[in-house]
Image (cartoon, rainbow, N blue to C red):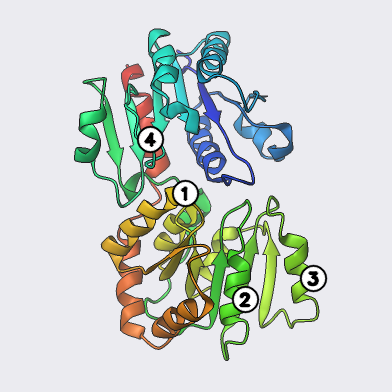
Amino acid sequence: MSLPPVVFRCTANARIGMGHLARCREMARELGARGQACHIAGLPDSLRQPGDTMLFASWTPLPEDGPATEDAARVVALCRTEGTRYLVLDDYRGGDIAYQQVLADAGLRWLQQFDSSGEGDFLAPILVNASPYERPEQYRPRLRNPETRLLFGPRYAVLRPEFARIAVREDGRPVRRILAAFGGGDDRGALDLVLAALGDLPDVALRLVSGRGNPRNAELAARLAGVDPARIELLVDPPAMAERIAECDLGIIAGGTMSYELAHCGLPMLLVALAPNQRRSCLGWQELTGTPFLGQIGDVMPDRLRAEVHRFVTGPELRRQVAARGRAEVDCKGAARLCDALMESDKA
């Protein structure tokens, strides 16, 4: 008997970042390895990569604006066209209870990644948030579906399979190279902050990683023209990102998907939130592992960042403790766990 296909509803762009799409790609990779076809809706063709043809049998752009219930109806129609009731919802509009009601009325079984900064209720059969801050007891009063399954915490983080193959390096090793990366979209001046704070840091190289969707790339490249790349390098969408991360000894990042990647690689990190909805995740990492949360971009001054970097560069035991605690939380099995949960009702 053939396995049912799965539809993904996803939003990603330079403003909100590419983490939603990255999660969907890796879940589709896991489902494809199990013999299931996947279809994705909601993204412009400009975000398609060559490898997406192997992950998704169809790619359907949808309007960015319009009533939430109309979008939900389009998603239901796509599920019916593909002959499935299984949906992964990784889109902010999913927080609208009217949107969820359309899905529930259509009999869909969906897994919903949600934004913890919202205040709405939930109907989803499976509710997911990998943030180290969120707790199931915080959300039970907001559940409208008594059978909702809550999958919370970093063990449900979705990482690319290349991270599972990374060789473990020694915790507390000297800091020779610092990674600074703030997702695939607009870094909102975070890389400029890093350069202002650390551009003249002695004996430590800087690796700045930016995404193609960052509108500041040309300005950054011009600023670094003539700078020795052995001292400061700018990489835009580099291949083998897991290796590029693992080659570093300390990270300065936002509180999104990359925080799980660095934790798994054993990199101690400093966190600067790019948006209010990253604040809770940053606070969670701070509580769980001792990772410093410096604040939101615009509120963090170069002197503060430089002082925190100095504390880590000169503190081998601090680096060792933070790295070990982070690695213990992320095991690269999140995608498999989520796919198991989604398809649970279809097991023979």
Q: CA distance from mark 3 to mark 1?
A: 32 Å
State which tag comes first along the sequence, 4 or 1.
1
Does the image show residue 103? yes
List the residue tagged with mark 1.
159
Say the numbered circle drawn on residue 222. 3
* Residue drawn at (69%, 50%) of the image: 213
Around disc 2, counting alpha carbons within 10 Å, would you say few (fewer than 14), some (14 to 19), or many (20 or more)?
some
State which tag comes first along the sequence, 2 or 3.
2
Above or below residue 206? Residue 134 is: above
Disc 3 to disc 4: CB gap under 8 Å: no
**Residue sitting farthest toward the bottom:** 202
List the residue tagged with mark 2.
195
State which tag comes first along the sequence, 1 or 2.
1
Measured as percent of width and height from the top left, residue 145 is found at: 26, 20
Disc 2 to disc 4: CB gap under 8 Å: no
Measured as percent of width and height from the top left, residue 251 is found at: 49, 70
**Among the 4 quarters of the image, the one containing residue 194:** bottom right
**Residue sitting farthest toward the front:** 299
Quadrant for the N terminus in the image = top left
* Residue drawn at (57%, 81%) of the image: 198
State which tag comes first along the sequence, 2 or 4.
2
Above or below residue 212? Residue 1 is: above
Amino acid carrying label 3: it is Ala
Q: Secondary structure at mark 3?
A: helix
**Among the 4 quarters of the image, the one containing residue 142:** top left
Q: CA distance from mark 1 to mark 2?
A: 28 Å
Q: CA distance from mark 4 to mark 1?
A: 12 Å
Q: CA distance from mark 2 to mark 3?
A: 13 Å
List the residue tagged with mark 4.
338
Q: CA distance from mark 2 to mark 4?
A: 38 Å
- Residue 186 is left or right of residue 34, and the answer is right
Q: CA distance from mark 3 to mark 4?
A: 43 Å
